[in-house]
Image (tube, rainbow, N blue to C red):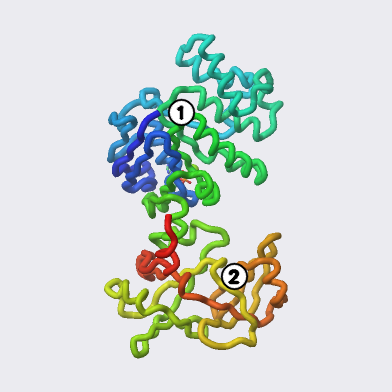
Amino acid sequence: MAHLKLNEITKTFKNGTEAVRGISFDVADREAVFLLGPSGAGKTTTLRLVAGLEDLDHGQISIGSVDRSRAVPRDRNVAMVYDKHSLFPHLSVRENMAYPLRIRKMDDAEMMRRIHSVSEVLQIEAQLDKMPGQLSGGQQQRVAIGRALVRDADVFLLDEPISHLDAQLRARMRVEFKRLQRDFNATMLYVSHDQLEAMTMADRIVLINKGRIEQIDEPQAMFDRPQTLFAATFIGEPVMNSLPVRLVERDGDHWFEIGTSLVPVESGWINSAAEKLNGTGEFTLGVRPQHLELADATQHGESIVHGVIYAVETLGSRVVFDIEIGAETVRVMTSVDEARSFPSRIGSPIAIRMSSEFFYLFDNRDGRTLLQAPFTAKSTH
Ligand code: ADP
Ligand code: MG
């Protein structure tokens, strides 16, 4: 295994698409780093650049401290896991797994020893003599992973290896992957568009958008302290609410005007970013649905914001209320028990209790985080 380092890499395709616009990050020896971002962000291109399947325009890629920026794929000693559709349908599971070893001319005894040890961990020993078509989707995917793991690669590259599986199997594979990475001490760069996958499996997440890095952090840190509105709304489910607010100041006290209500905010918190706050007083407020509370429509006062039910989604143990406040929709997530005390009919008046403890503040102009929520300063990681 080895350390992988990307330094200011760029790639523009011949048709002018700037897929990767100066990306730098590293993957430590035995670390699982997730390259996370929406479709078209440049994830696959970055992975292909590391594998040597695309040529770099600028920047350097080093593997195990050796510059491999211009090396042919074979000299990089990386193993790429494709999805299950890349298995050879006319070869048995054993021969599919043997394939990368045969082209490296490994002797038969060593080859069979490796195939057996990997298939034991992947629990596909009983399938070795079958053809891929005789296996379930999940088993096929494990064979595809096994085919990469049998090699003694320095770095494993995985491009959305489980995104085609059904939800139940995906949940199981998330757990299995985590164990595999431990068991094999693998240095892993894993591409995904699924924030849940990254949150549950990554040591660190590299969040990319439009070919650029938004943030690099451990999962919980990225969730608690997003550096941009993009990161705040990409990570977490249900998605963080974002709404335009005006900051009002009177005699040194501060409020946000939300709908027709004023929600008090800590002056100390606002003042800590005084030099960054623009003159207009207009910002984007962020608050997660689980950090809001429902309140009775008859209640009035500070921190109570009034609205109308737009939709109610029941998720089994949780209920999500979509509430219209003027032109904005705010989502509130609550427990089933809690939800029972409130109306659920579309159009019913309802209120939300907001605490500035959970407010994030973003710059309207560039989407940067101006202030992290006060509660995050108290949580220790
Ligand atoms: P992701 O994997 O994050 O969905 P990709 O790396 O596949 O994104 O693509 C990034 C951007 O580059 C997209 O706009 C995509 O259309 C474009 N792109 C990818 N491959 C090529 C190619 N071979 N030629 C031209 N454009 C490409
Ligand atoms: Mg892709």
Q: Quadrant of the N terminus?
A: top left
Mark 2 residue type: Val
- Circle on res. 79: 1
Q: In which quadrant of the rendered view does residue 304 lie?
A: bottom right
Say which residue appears at 51% left-offset and 31% top-offset: 183
| Mark 2 lies on residue | 332
The quadrant of the picture occupied by the C terminus is bottom left
Q: Position of residue 52 (x, y in %)?
A: 38, 31
Give coordinates of residue 356: x percent, y percent: 46, 75
Residue 188 vertical placement versus 236 (above, below) = above
The type of residue carrying mark 1 is: Ala
Q: For this view, does 9 lie left or right of residue 220?
A: left
Mark 1 is surrounded, within 10 Å at the Cα level, by few (under 14), some (14 to 19) or many (20 or more) other residues, namely many
Considering only order in the chain, which callout, 1 or 2, is on the residue closer to the N terminus? 1
**Residue that protrudes farthest toward the bottom in the picture:** 251
Name the secondary structure under disc 1.
strand
Instruction: Using a 10 Å C-alpha cutoff, classify the residue at mark 2 as few (fewer than 14 neighbours), some (14 to 19) or many (20 or more).
Output: many
Q: Is residue 296 left or right of residue 66?
A: right
Name above or below for residue 172 compared with residue 140.
below
Report the number of numbered marks. 2
At horizontal 35% and vertical 76% (from top left) the residue drawn is 268
Residue at horizontal 43%, vertical 26%? 153
For residue 51, say whether it is visible: yes
Observer-side mark, 2 or 1, equals 2
The verdict on label 1 being within 8 Å of ligand 2 is no
Which residue occupies the foreground of this view, 135 or 205? 205
In the structure shown, which secondary structural element does the residue marked by tag 2 occupy?
strand
